[in-house]
Image (tube, coloured by chain):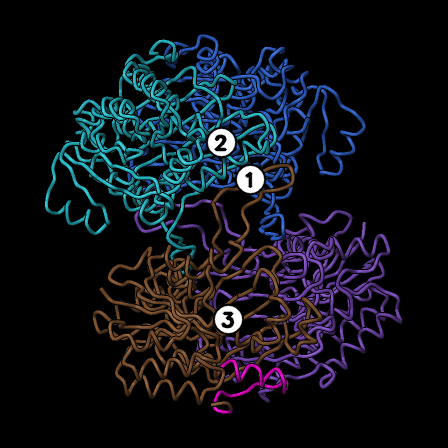
Chain colours: A cyan, B purple, C brown, D blue
Amino acid sequence: MLKLGIIGAGRIGRVHSESISKYVKGAEIKAISDVRVTDELKEWATGMGIENVYEDYKAILNDPEIDAVLVCSSTNTHAPISIEAAQAGKHVFCEKPVDADPTKIREVLREVEKAGVKFQVGFNRRFDHNFKAIKDRVVAGDIGDVHLIRVTSRDPDAPPIEYVKVSGGMFFDMTIHDFDMIRYLSGSEVTEVYAAGGVLVDPRIGEAGDIDTAVITLKLANGAIGVIDNSRKAVYGYDQRAEVFGSKGAVQTRNDTDSTAVYSCEKGVISEKPKYFFLERYMQSFADEMICFIDSIVNNKPTLVNGNDGLQPVLIALAAKKSLDEGRPVKLSEVS
Amino acid sequence: MLKLGIIGAGRIGRVHSESISKYVKGAEIKAISDVRVTDELKEWATGMGIENVYEDYKAILNDPEIDAVLVCSSTNTHAPISIEAAQAGKHVFCEKPVDADPTKIREVLREVEKAGVKFQVGFNRRFDHNFKAIKDRVVAGDIGDVHLIRVTSRDPDAPPIEYVKVSGGMFFDMTIHDFDMIRYLSGSEVTEVYAAGGVLVDPRIGEAGDIDTAVITLKLANGAIGVIDNSRKAVYGYDQRAEVFGSKGAVQTRNDTDSTAVYSCEKGVISEKPKYFFLERYMQSFADEMICFIDSIVNNKPTLVNGNDGLQPVLIALAAKKSLDEGRPVKLSEVS
Amino acid sequence: MLKLGIIGAGRIGRVHSESISKYVKGAEIKAISDVRVTDELKEWATGMGIENVYEDYKAILNDPEIDAVLVCSSTNTHAPISIEAAQAGKHVFCEKPVDADPTKIREVLREVEKAGVKFQVGFNRRFDHNFKAIKDRVVAGDIGDVHLIRVTSRDPDAPPIEYVKVSGGMFFDMTIHDFDMIRYLSGSEVTEVYAAGGVLVDPRIGEAGDIDTAVITLKLANGAIGVIDNSRKAVYGYDQRAEVFGSKGAVQTRNDTDSTAVYSCEKGVISEKPKYFFLERYMQSFADEMICFIDSIVNNKPTLVNGNDGLQPVLIALAAKKSLDEGRPVKLSEVS
Amino acid sequence: MLKLGIIGAGRIGRVHSESISKYVKGAEIKAISDVRVTDELKEWATGMGIENVYEDYKAILNDPEIDAVLVCSSTNTHAPISIEAAQAGKHVFCEKPVDADPTKIREVLREVEKAGVKFQVGFNRRFDHNFKAIKDRVVAGDIGDVHLIRVTSRDPDAPPIEYVKVSGGMFFDMTIHDFDMIRYLSGSEVTEVYAAGGVLVDPRIGEAGDIDTAVITLKLANGAIGVIDNSRKAVYGYDQRAEVFGSKGAVQTRNDTDSTAVYSCEKGVISEKPKYFFLERYMQSFADEMICFIDSIVNNKPTLVNGNDGLQPVLIALAAKKSLDEGRPVKLSEVS
């Protein structure tokens, strides 16, 4: 039985706790830490069967029984804590993005390699049943050579302005998943990025220095072209679709819904809206990424989302930001 | 160039005129007759390029230039006019039902055979792209042995009560198409019928001695079971679907719509209602049945909807009516 | 924390154990019994955190700490064990069918009522997201008066012949769920049944005295007509659909699939087959029926699948069998 | 009865002839001209009921009975013939593109205005039922402010290399329709274009100086962003889809198919491929654009695809070509 420590007891830390306790065999959470240990947190931890609740994450790193840690703290601490954890000999699951600075990510990767521990980044959507079904077709050769990859990624509503101000921008907090998806589905590396964007949803987002709507074109090393369209607000729900097109065919996915019911009446033929929230939509993928992480440790296999998978989307996001600012395509080599 | 005469200038007679002039090569309408020749009819005929408009259909039968006639007059005249036409050496396209009395239909078939003319019955839905796609799968062997056939056939609105009183009942004026479809899709003959029905749409239909809602189970000679569900009123439009299920798979069709547009908004994901009216829904099939009829004459091929195809659905309708009245399954041999 | 005992550690007993431990808050399984206690069972129970494993279910009934039992033993023991459990003051969740004999079911219901305990029957499909979405539309009045209910229920493959011989027949082991669904979706009682059936999948099923293909028509007290089509073998997977049609519209459900991926290639546009197995398809409903049961105990609410809901489908199955044998519609009053 | 002359008896000239004779009331074709008058053409014209077949299009322009001409000759003659026709007082329907040189298009527009004749450009897809359904939602305000427009336009197979060499390039012969569609659906003007493209389908296309795969991003005056993805070869058929997304919702269209049949078997759930060829897919739109043209003449209404609608897509194509060549976004003002 593998023993885990979770660093950071916010939303995503608790999501992982719950999916581990429900779905992951062969692992249990021994401790959780958070900079604010409240009574509510203690009670929640008890309910989850977690023995120890610490204020200082170092208590987790110092526990020799703990095999692996999940870094679910605030983004700016991902890199330093990952490094410390690796140095303490813990396997590391790190939430995305690892850091906004490629230099720091590379430092993490060096330390991880030096320590010989497993390192997995939280790009959970790779484990989503729909995106995985696309990937399976690509890998099986059913698409042939990949020519076009399209990702539609639209949130159901804009985040609070306070969050927008500190999030690092839409490309870093939202599109980062889509950048990863383009690489994952294509099996190739992004070499150049062109981003067109605007403030169409809420002017306050623009005042906060960000955009809320974008189309990003990505050139890939294998010649394929990727394109992402983003919006911070799709009034009909969380719109998450993708398509890969190639020499032998195409595969695309629709949104998931709560049921398949279709209602026909005088007004039209009405089916359900997409699942509204990322936790509903992607819950299964959170469990499966954890099962993958545990499996890579127990059976000494490579993780399916490795260090370079943590680095590349950050480089793409940097290039996208630069492209948007300068109104021109930007090569990844310019930001690496 | 084949010359045609149309007997009966009501809705269906005009539908055939228009589809012949637009889509059917190698045939032209030389004359049309109707018991009421109005100025409007004459003007319409001129617009269609039809030379002659007669009050008496015998003028058409007596024209030696006319090769074939379309019997589009009122139902009670279908059989006698078909017989006269055959005796006059004209090929006959007869609207459905040929007659409500099997004895009269058999007489028509004898005369047609004696005269050696072509005889086709107006079961246009056999030529519909959707039902034809099902049939093609069945014939190709993709379904294997047929086990179940389901037909959903619901009108967008109940006919006027005056029509209900003289129509011969729902089984004869509406379900007759579905009875044909069960035979067509299964490639087998109906041997026994059980009908459950009720008056749920409009009590006046019940007062007129008819029903407006039904489920009819049909046993087929090859062991398969067919089931039809009917309603006189589907508020969302004309609902016309079918499914054939067998040892190797199943094939089903959805409704046709005016466009494929899907609108997603806060209320839901809304697509279009089925095409509302039988003329919109089945226009292509009216043209194709006529092309088939002309082809069978010109190339001396059997028609695709022959005399027995005109007889069997009437027998099934009689059995369904008897089943409904007596509350028990009725064998076709009881009504033949 | 409610304490549960599970009687019968076969497939369904273990399904309930797992869904309770994963999804049901406020309840834990204290003991499980089975007529055959193997090492494998003991090990499984340990893994599930179940303290006690008994050979004799009476040990569960005699444990004063246990609040409720799940009767998951063989069908012929459902009724007597349910009676004993009620007399012991335990709340009872009983798998379907309660019994094949209505007299015994009525006896169970009397004892349950006398004891004042909760009683829920395992018609899990009522809790399925798709069927629930239909029910919600009906209850909301979106369908208006219900006119037609269609249930398609086809298994992915025929059960072993040995099972067919003892199952009580297709109507009792498979269609029983569909009989319940007709009542549930319509909100009305079945008054008369007509069953057409045949042996089209496997002649050995016929030799064992059963059928493998059927269409069952059901008349309901409110005038609506229900129709079920069944097959023991749909080569494309587990086909579970339903439709309710009424004066204001219709609602229908499609099958669930593993992903929404659609692959377009030279051969066609290919989407996924229905989920293959009832455990995959209905897992969520097994959890939700258990949550409902626990909730009805803890908050002293009526169960959503009560004693009469256990009785009626058995009466319908008896009528369907009699209809099939005698080739005529059978009123429920004939078998009650 | 309006009298028409058709200049150019190639594929598109004949398509218009057939749709006019079948579907357009109030107009007839009096003459057709082609630089090569063959026996086959004469025979075809006779079959269509066209009285006159000329080698010299001036014979059409000189016929005072002819009210309007359809310019269906080779692209390089569109502008000069349109000018001559306008000067001769004929209303002009001109196939797309009017010319590859904006100066020449502007000259045409000046002459048309001077002559006071109607001028319509052959962007038939505006009249397609699917794209029209999107436009109707936009115009009705159901989408709110438009934020994103996506057009997928993929041909079923690459044209012959000989054609590629003279076509003017993919942007001019294929994407030109999509450029028009972006303007039409958004109701706004394109201000800047970025094109990423490659040769992924057939290296001979690259050798001929063209591309076969592209993603084009378009900035619009109202702030919306458009994106087009193109391929010369989709092995599954002619892929023609669009989506408009905005503040109140989104609307998207799927491909049309020959039937709605869905076949379920062991291999999967298989529906039909998109209609393969543009003539099948867009036949209804060719008829409807002609009805619109005739209507604008007869009732003296503005045409729905006017001179500026002919000019703008050419400017966009020029900008796209320049963007591709120079690897940077290009403003329309740079090529105007």
Q: Are marks 2 and 1 on the same chain?
A: no
Q: Amino acid at mark 2?
A: Thr
Where does label 1 land, which residue? C263
Q: Check contact, mark 3 vs mark 1: CB within 8 A.
A: no
Image coordinates of residue C306 in percent, x first then y, are 34, 77
Residue placed at 59% from the left, 14% from the top? D76
* Numbered circle sitting on residue D152: 2
> Mark 2 packing: few (<14 Cα in 10 Å), some, or many (20+)?
some
Residue B207 versus residue A318: which sits nearer the camera? Answer: A318
The residue identified by callout 3 is B231
Q: Which of C16 and A156 lies nearest the eye of the viewer?
A: C16
> Distance between the Cα atoms at labels 2 and 1?
16 Å
- Side of B21 relative to C271 (left or right): right
Q: Which residues are magenta?
A: C316-334
Residue B163 visible, this angle: no
Q: Residue at x 34, y 47 (%)?
A: A275
Identify residue type, mark 3: Ser
